[in-house]
Amino acid sequence: MKKLLLTFAAMTIAFSAAADEGMWLLPYLQKMNIKDMKAKGLRLSAEDIYSINKSSLKDAIVIFGGGCTGEIVSDKGLIFTNHHCGYGSIQALSSVEHDYLKNGFWANSHAEELPCPGLSVRFVRKIEDVTAQILGNIPSISGEQERSEMVSANINGLSEEMRKDLAEGQTVQIVSFFGGNQYFAFVYEVYNDVRLVGTPPSSIGKFGGDTDNWMWPRHTGDFSIFRVYADKDNKPAAYSKDNVPYKAPRHLEISLNGVDEGDFTMIMGFPGSTTRYMTSYEIDQMLEVDNPQRIYIRGERQAILWEAMEASDEIRIKYASKYAGSSNYWKNSIGMSRGITKLGVKAQKQAEEAAFQKWANENTLPEEGFIDALDEMKQSVEKLTPIEGTIQYLNEAFLRGIEIISAARTATTRLDGFYKDYDAALDCKVAKRMMTIARENMAPEALPSIYTEVIDKEFGGDIEKYVDWLYANSAFSSLEKAKALSDEERKADPAAQLAASVVEKYNSYIPALREHSPQQNKAHRLYVAGLMKMQPEKAWYSDANFTIRCTYGNVLPYNPADAITYNYYTTLEGVIAKEDTSNPLEFTVEPKLKELYAKKDYGRYADKNGRLRVGFLCNLDITGGNSGSPVLDGNGRLVGLAFDGNWEAMSGDVAFEPELQRCIAVDIRYVLFVVDKFAGCNHIMSELDIVQAKAKRK
């Protein structure tokens, strides 16, 4: 029987990259990118960046928490990342009495560093192409279900085999690339004792809040500082007072040179998710269903939360991280829809698809599947859109939106953590709105049965009366009552009945989802494979999937609209000018910062013109997950921390826009200024390797 094994490794390493677009795999830098990187200003070798035989820059880059990047900046395991990446841990450690979100925190010794339960970092120890092991035995004539089952079995088998050789604390993950046409195995070493060392107040670390999120000019000091701890043998260990700072074999030097327009920069980090191979049919689903629903549902909930957070410090601390997590992707969805429409991305995709179809018709055989790939995608999207739209509403409005549902589904042993950041009265207000908009916007048959069986029958269809009754009678409105429930009482509780009703309806759509998803997966895989066959001379990169990548380019301004040019950096002057006492949660400026500004007391962190730079732009290809990534100069030294993209190019996850797309980074000199001059934290400053030797520029 004929076997199918597409040689994507060979295809992706054969040609040099020529654009700033791209999230490149580290093992292929030598063959694909290094010549272009050096032409742009890199002064390192590919092996300096990634080596399988010796320490390299890769060893200083970590996955921080569940969705960000961090970098090791001292031989004692010190980590720099974004403030918004550490936000959840900072919030969890905060209280009204110790409000680290509002006031910041700076440890003066190792003993003062605060343990962060549940926070971990992961080092990449090995990367291996395992495509042959995963796809080598799959017949070309296999159906999609059979193929999927064989791939899963191969992944499980290989993972189990690789685990036999792993050290304690290590784990392996086998990940799909290019729509399932290539596979890599990543070996990670996981450290679970991570402690907070320093964080600026939110008035610096989150300056601008949601108003400035995704916007330029930006004046946010978006950084926080943590430390990895290990056992006496420098191995991963659970938290213990006997643990010691991790002895890092590689850490980043920090440059005070700053950046000028045109300078080479690069990022290594863990971009989360892109859909650059999305078709025009999927764009329709995004613009007509996914984004509008997310924007509306989250917007309604966030308005209620924000009002409560403004009125109470206790509520602000409890809901700060929840609100930030919700609003970030909410605003992203607004910008994404705007950008895709304004920049004509759908038309670009349609032109690509027309060229692909012409190539497939003229150059491939029907049994290869390329001719039918786009039609298969269209059919699958038509089937899946109403299903996924309903699932999204159930998830956003109920499972994510109404917290008492989460409480009823949380194990008793974990309730303490849940209720630490929960307010039943606020959740009651949210529940009324969520259940109302669900009835107004969902098809009657898509609603959970609680509407017809309880709300309509027992409360005459009055949602507000039902919700008031729910919170008055459910034990899950109180930690003490919830913990006292027996198993039988749990099941009979009104909140548990609501949760069961929602989950039952949600699960009723899963069979249809499973039925039609394979068709879409196959269409996507063949479309990606076909594009690469159609243009074999092009340097291809896979969509982001939260695996380590390198992106590179230059420091550049941009023109967002006719007759408008944005400079490539911002300064402390802009921070002072943005202060808005009517909006204290977003635009407060600390008195100490004003004092330093008035005296121009910037120390060695000012630029050559005596100004203190806050942020800068570069045309690097990043997305969510890259938050906290190091921005490195041509010598591999840290010059900034990536923390955002720009509003005008929010369509970038679907289509890279080279003229508009920019990475927003906080200047490392502003970070050091805050640590040194604002906070006076010698505990941190004393262990950093800071250099200021002017590098030759190209």
Image: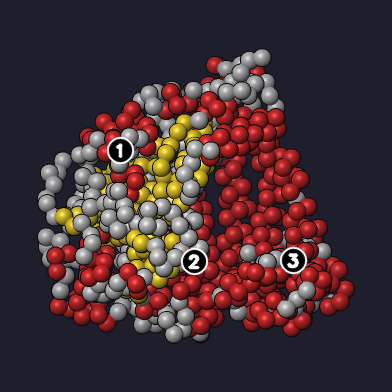
Label 3 sits on residue: 499
Q: In the figure, is residue 349 to the left or right of 628? A: right
281 vs 337: above or below: above
Nearer to the camera, 25 or 560:
25
Circle 1: residue type: Lys
Asked if the residues shown at circle 3 and circle 1 are in contact, with their CB atoms under 8 angstroms apart, the answer is no
Q: Secondary structure at mark 2?
A: loop
Front-most of residues 280 and 636: 636
Residue 616 picture location, percent across and down: 27, 57
Location of residue 467 (image quadrant): bottom right
User: Can residue 551 be seen?
Assistant: yes
Cα distance between the residues tagged 1 and 2: 32 Å
Label 3 – label 1 distance at C-alpha: 52 Å
Figure quadrant of the N terminus: top right
The crowd level at tag 3 (other Cα within 10 Å; few <14, some 14-19, many 20+) is many
The three-letter amino acid code for the residue at tag 2 is Pro
Q: Nearer the viewer, mark 2 or mark 3?
A: 2
Nearer the observer: mark 3 or 1; the answer is 1
